[in-house]
Image (cartoon, grey):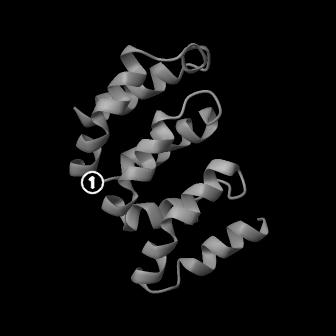
Amino acid sequence: MNRDNNMIVKLGQESDEKVISKLPEIFQLLKKGEVQPSNEVLDIISKFPTESTPYILEILGENEEQINLQIWTLKEVVPKLPFFVKIALTDEIERMVNKPSSQEKEQKLDSIAQEALNSIL
């Protein structure tokens, strides 16, 4: 576990307000690859689904560079979210199914997105 993942573990023990204030940083570190997707990150996202929704949409909407993070989000994060958040993500997931980028298609992200969509609808 790297230093930034240790920070995530410690952050999970902080007050809700502190964790919420750090969500932008957590998602930025995830996108940069400085924090690895982990159960600790998933626990934080699951605890604050409404506050995490814009960042999840951002990850799902980013083509090309974030394929592994998109896969983790679709397979691990989306199933743990409450129904109302899943509904908020539906348009972007449908885009991934119906109009995937060439790289999303190459990485079979459209199939993974279809599985996530099937679990929602």
**Is residue 92 depicted above or below 99 in this figure?**
below
Q: Name the element at disc 1.
A: loop
Q: What residue appears at the point 61 percent right and 14 percent down from the top-left corner?
A: 106
Quadrant for the C terminus in the image: top left
Q: Does residue 75 show up? A: no
Q: In terms of depth relative to the viewer, which is nearer, 94 or 1?
A: 94
Q: Residue furthest right?
A: 2
Provide residue 54's location: percent of width, then percent of height: 38, 51
Query: From the viewer's perspective, is 18 left or right of 108?
Result: left
Where, by quadrant of the figure, is residue 10 drawn? bottom right
Q: Does residue 114 show up? A: yes
Query: From the viewer's perspective, is 74 left or right of 103?
Result: left
Q: Amino acid at mark 1?
A: Pro
**Is residue 121 depicted above or below 28 in this figure?**
above
Q: What residue appears at the point 32 percent right and 40 percent down from the top-left corner?
A: 89
Residue assigned mark 1 = 82
Provide residue 111's location: percent of width, then percent of height: 46, 20
**Is residue 84 depicted above or below 19 in this figure?**
above
Provide residue 47's location: percent of width, then percent of height: 38, 68
Query: From the viewer's perspective, is 103 left or right of 56?
Result: right
Quadrant for the N terminus in the image: bottom right
Provide residue 25's location: percent of width, then percent of height: 57, 65
Q: In terms of depth relative to the viewer, which is nearer, 25 or 105?
A: 25
Q: In terms of depth relative to the viewer, which is nearer, 23 or 13?
A: 23
Q: What residue appears at the point 57 percent right and 63 percent down from the top-left corner?
A: 26
